[in-house]
Amino acid sequence: MCSTAAELLPALALVFGVAVAFAPIPRITWEHQEVGLVRFHEPGIYNYSALLMSEDEGTLYVGAREAVFAVSALNISRKLHEVYWEVSEDKKAKCAEKGKSKQTECLNYIRVLQPLSSTSLYVCGTNAFQPTCDHLNLTSFKFLGKNEDGKGRCPFDPAHSYTSVIVDGELYSGTSYNFLGSEPIISRNSSHSPLRTEYAIPWLNEPSFVYADVIRRSPDGMEGEDDRVYFFFTEVSVEYEFVLKLMIPRIARVCKGDQGGLRTLQKKWTSFLKARLICSRPDSGLVFNVLRDVFVLRGPGLKEPIFYALFTPQLNNVGLSAVCAYNLSTAEAVFSRGKYMQSATVEQSHTKWVRYNGPVPTPRPGACINSEARAANYTSSLSLPDKTLQFVKDHPLMDDSVTPIDNRPRLIKRDVNYTQIVVDRTRALDGTIYDVIFVSTDRGALHKAVNLESEVHIIEETQLFQDSEPVQTLLLSSKKGRRFVYAGSNSGVVQAPLAFCGKHSSCQDCILARDPYCAWSPTEAACVIVYQAEGTSRAWIQEMSGDTSSCPDKIKESSPQHPFKHGDTAELKCSQKSNLARVVWKFQNGVLKAESPKYGLMGRKNLLIFNLSEGDSGVYQCLAEERVRNKTVSQVVAKLEVQVLPRPSLASHSP
Amino acid sequence: MCSTAAELLPALALVFGVAVAFAPIPRITWEHQEVGLVRFHEPGIYNYSALLMSEDEGTLYVGAREAVFAVSALNISRKLHEVYWEVSEDKKAKCAEKGKSKQTECLNYIRVLQPLSSTSLYVCGTNAFQPTCDHLNLTSFKFLGKNEDGKGRCPFDPAHSYTSVIVDGELYSGTSYNFLGSEPIISRNSSHSPLRTEYAIPWLNEPSFVYADVIRRSPDGMEGEDDRVYFFFTEVSVEYEFVLKLMIPRIARVCKGDQGGLRTLQKKWTSFLKARLICSRPDSGLVFNVLRDVFVLRGPGLKEPIFYALFTPQLNNVGLSAVCAYNLSTAEAVFSRGKYMQSATVEQSHTKWVRYNGPVPTPRPGACINSEARAANYTSSLSLPDKTLQFVKDHPLMDDSVTPIDNRPRLIKRDVNYTQIVVDRTRALDGTIYDVIFVSTDRGALHKAVNLESEVHIIEETQLFQDSEPVQTLLLSSKKGRRFVYAGSNSGVVQAPLAFCGKHSSCQDCILARDPYCAWSPTEAACVIVYQAEGTSRAWIQEMSGDTSSCPDKIKESSPQHPFKHGDTAELKCSQKSNLARVVWKFQNGVLKAESPKYGLMGRKNLLIFNLSEGDSGVYQCLAEERVRNKTVSQVVAKLEVQVLPRPSLASHSP
C-alpha cells in the first residue's frame, strides 16, 4: 500500500515574512542605576496613577491611593504638600461585606484629578466602592469636605476604566455608573445642564475608557462653531464578527453647547457620535484594535491638533504594539459628512449593522449647533426636531472610519507591550521638525522613537522602574527650562529628562544616536542638548542621517595594560553601548576570530586572550561597527596595548 | 494652565499575560552535523516537494522539479531509479512569452504523485503552465507518455496550492482550474463519472488547498454507508467580517458514491458540504485561522481516525503556531445533523450569512446515499429530488463548527512558524499511549512534542536542513524496523529516526528526556529505543514523569586537569545539552558566582577561574539543574580536579 504526504507552498513567504520584521531595537539601553533619575515615593503609599501639571506654578500634582501630593516639577523628590483621604473603617467594613478585598479594593483610589480653578483641584476617588468627589484648596492643601456623589464621574471599582477632562469648570467623564461596572456612561457633570449617554448597546457596548480632551473651535474656522469634547475608548464591536467577541477602538465626540433634547433625548447627548479608529497593516495581517492611550499633540506650528494613539492587538498578541497618528480634520470629516450605520434584522432572528443609505434628516443628526443651524432657527439642541433626535438616538455609529495619517502606523514594535504615550514636537538644528514619541512599557521602561525617512529609529530605552512594573501614567512637560517626562507606577513617580546627550562621549557616538535633541559641540568636546542652545549653536554638529563624516578626526590613544606573564590569560575591556553595533577586535589590523582556542569573548564585548606568549604583545583595537542607512560606520572604541613579559629562560629552571 | 495625563489599567494583565506564555522550549537542540542524518539530493534538481511511500516495497518515491526518483526507504541516499520529465524548449518559450520566468516558473514541478496500481504511479506536473499527467511504470521506471490534460488535477502555477488523493483508481483533487489561478475546483477525475464543484463564491472562495484523504465506511457502522473524501483548505470567509479580509479554515467532504444530479447539479457534487474548523483559545485572544497541514492518525487501537491539523494565525502573526486534533465523528455529526448557513440580503445592498432556520428538504441535502435513502427509493444522487439539490447548491456551508478535542489546541508555540505535521501513536513501557507530534519549521528544523499531563513537552528540536530553508513535506513511516520521518525541502530530502535515545549518556539524561521512545537499560548502561525491544524490556527504566529516583546511583569520578600555574586562568568545560537546565558550578560545596572578578562563564556553560592561586586547588563540580513538574532535578554533569602549582618562592626572583 501507498500513502502520501501533503504539501504546502503558497502565501507561506508572505505570512511568515512578518516574523522577522517589526523588531526595531532600541539603540541604547540605559539601566536604572546608570542614569540616576529623580524619584518620588511616599512610604506606605501606592498606585501613583494620576498626574497633573501646573505649568505656571511649576508644580506636579500626584494622585495616589488615599493621598494627593504636590511636588516640585523641577525636582519631584521635593515634596511641597500632601493631603490624605482615607476610607473610614465602617465604610471599609461595608465594602468587605460585599465581597471585596479590604486590603486592596476597599481603599480610596484617586481617579479624577482635574484643575477646577487657579486655587483648587477637583478630585474624585473610588472610596471603597462609593465614589466620592471633593474640592482640594491649593492654598491650604486641604479638602473642602464637599462629599459629592462621584457616581458617573469616577468608577466604583479601582480595576475599572475611566477618563475625564474639565472644560470651563464642568467635568466630562467616561466611566461605569454602577457597582458592578456593567453600566457604562459618558456624562457631563454640570449644575445647569447635566447630560449623559443612553444606556443602550448601540451607544456604548462594554467600553474601556482611555482618554478624553476638549478641542476648542478653531479661531479661523467657521463662525458660530462649537467646542467639542472627544472621547477615546475600546468597546465590543457590533459591526464585526469573528470566532470570538471582537473589540474595536472608537473615537467619539460631543458638542460643548449640547443641552439635550426637549422630549426625545431629554438630558441625553444629542451630539454623541462615534466612529472606528483604524490602525492596521492589512498587507502584513496586522490589526491593532485595542486602544491603550492617546496623546493630543498641539503646537504653535501645527495647523490642527494631531491625535497620537497607542494600540495593541486583541488577537494573537504575544507582544506587539503600534502607534497611529490622526489628523483632527479626518475625524471631523467623518462626523460632519460621513455615512451612518444602522442595525437591521435579517431573517427574523439576526441583527446586523450595515451602512445606512436612506435619507438623513435636517439638521444633520449629531451635528453641533452652528451659524447655519441658528439661521434655520435651531438655536440650541432643545429646539432640534424630533426626527433628527430620533435618528441620532438610533444611529450613533458612523459607517466611515477614521484612518491614520499616511494610512499606516507610525511605529510597530514586536516583543513589547506599550502602555502609555506622549509626543514632543521638536526642531533639529537644521530646522527639520521631528515628532519624538515616548512610549512606556508594561515592564517599567520608556522607549524614545523617531521616524527617520519612513524607518522607525528607537533612540533609546530607559529603565524607569527597577522592578519591571507597568508604567500607568506618562506626562510630558516641554516648557523651556523644564523638559521632562514624568511616569507613574504602582510604586512611585519618576522624572526623566528628554535626552541623555551628555552620556555620549565621542562625536561619532553623539551623531550615531540620531537624537534630534543632541548635537556635538566641538568647542566643549561634548554632546550637548540642543534645546538649551542660545546662539552658540552655529558650530554644533548634528546629522540625523547618522553621517559622522563631519566629526573632527580624533586619534584614539592606546592605553597600556598591566604587563602580562607568559601563559597568562588577558581580558581586554571594551565598553560599547549601542545595541545596533557589532564589536570587532583587531590585532595588527587583522580581525580576531572569537571562540577560537586562542581568543574568547566575555559578555559579548570583552576579549579574552588565552595562553599569552610574546607574539601576542602589541596594540589591540575594539571597533564598533554599526549599520546606518545601509552603510556601515566603524569607530574605534578602545585601543589597548598588551605587553607580555619574556618567558623566564628554561635554563634557570633546570637543576 | 493645567494639563492631565490619561491612564489605563483594566484588562491589561489579561491581555499582556499572553506575552510570556506559549513558549515551550525544545529540551534538546540537535545541530545538523551532530546527528548525521541520511540525505538524498540529486545535483541540479530542486523542489523535492512530493513524497510517496510504498511500505510493502520499502521504497520512497520522490517528486521534484522535472524528476521523479525511487530511493530505498531504509537509506534514502541509495537511489534505485530515476526518471526525468523536462519541459520542451518551445513550451518554455511560450510560457515565457506569457510573462513567466523561464528559469523558475516555466519548468515542470511534480505536484501529483499517487499510487495508481501496484505497478504504476499517477504523476502530474505544472509543465510550464500547461499541467499534464502521465502514468509512471514502476517496473521500467519510464513514463507511458499518456500526455493527459492535467487541468483541474494539478495547478498551472507552481506557487498555487494543490492537494490530491487517489481513491479506488480515481483521482480526487483540489486546485485551481485556470492559468491565473482564479478559478478554484475540487473535482473527481473519473472516466465514468467526473464531478466538480460549482464555480461560485459560496462553494469555494479563494481557497488554499492543504490536504485530502479518504475515510472508508466504518466496518461496524450502519449498513449501506458510503466512503467519504475529506478536503482541508483555508478560504476567504463569507460569514465573518473585520477590518480586513478574514481567512477561515475549512473541512469539506464529498461522498464517493456521488454521481451528480440529473438536471440540477449535473456533473457537480451533490454531496459537497463544508464547515469551519475551530482552533482557538478565546481566553487568551488566540485565533488560529490559517490551516497549514493535516495528518490523519489511524491505528488498530483507534476507534475512529483523528485529524491532526496545524495552524498559524492570519492576524498579528509574528511567529505563532498551533496544533488542534479533531475526532472524525465530530465532523461527521456537523455534516449529518448540523444546521446550514444561508446568505441573506439586508437593506437592498448588503449580503450577510446567517443560520438557516427554515425547513430542510428530505432527503437531507448533501448527505451520502445510505440504506435509508435507498429504502425511500433514492438509489443514487441522480434520483435525488430537485428541492434537495437546489438546497445544497445554495447552502454548501454549515452553521455549526467542527471543534477540537478538549475544545482547545494540543500545542501552541510562539516564535516559530510550523509548516508540516505528522503524528505517531506509540506505547510507552508502562502501556500508556502517547501521540508524538512531529512538526517542521520554516527554518529547516523538526520539533518532536508530546502532551504530558496537559502540559506540552517539546522533547527535541533537530536541524534537518543546514540552510534554514522551509520544510515543504513531511512523511512518517512507522513500520516495524523502519521508523523514520522523511522531510522534503527545496534542496533535498532528509531521513531522521524517530528518536536519538543513544545520545543520552546517563540514566538521568535518558529519563529527563521524557521521550516515550527511550528507556534506560541498566544492563547495557545505555539509553535504548523502546520499540526495538524484544522481551528484554523488563529491567528497563522509563519514567515519563521525569522522576529519576529509579536510576542507579553512579558516583561521578573527577577527572584531573593539567596542573595550572599561579596567576593562570583556568577554563573548565561542562557539556550539558538540555536547554531547560541551568548550569551551576560548585567548589567545596559552595555555589560559585559567575561574573565576579574571580569567575566568569564562557558560552554560558564553561567556568573561567581568573588569577589562580593555591587556594583554588580542589574539585569543581558542574551541575545541571532542571525543573520537571515543579521539582528541581539536579545532576552532576562534570567533576573536574584543579591543581595549582605552588608559587615559585619570591626569593628565587630576588637578585
Image (spheres, coloured by chain):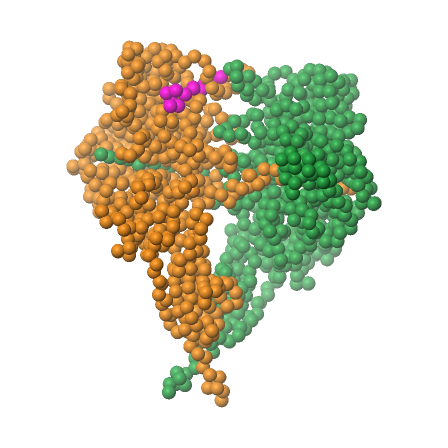
Chain colours: A orange, B green
Q: In the rendered view, does A478 fall on the left or right side of A633?
A: left
For the C terminus of chain B, give its image quadrant.
bottom left
Residue B501, visible in the rendered structure: no
Can you give x and y, in whole percent of width and height, for residue B514 in the image? 60, 52
The quadrant of the rendering that contains the N terminus of chain B is top left
In this view, A650 is above or below B304: below
Answer whether residue A334 is magenta in the image: yes
Q: Residue at coordinates 39% horizontally, 83% vertically from top-left?
A: B650
The magenta stretch spans residue B581: no
Across and down, in percent, residue A618 comes to 42, 70
Q: Residue at x 75, y 42 (%)?
A: B85
The residue lying at 71 percent from left, 31 percent from top is B151
Q: Is residue A456 visible?
A: yes
Camera-nearest residue between B414 and A467: B414
User: Which residue lies at the image location 58% right of the left edge and 35% below the top edge?
Assistant: B290
In this view of the protein, which residue sits in the foreground, A564 or A68? Answer: A564
Q: Which residues are magenta?
A: A333-344
- In the image, is A456 to the left or to the right of A143? right
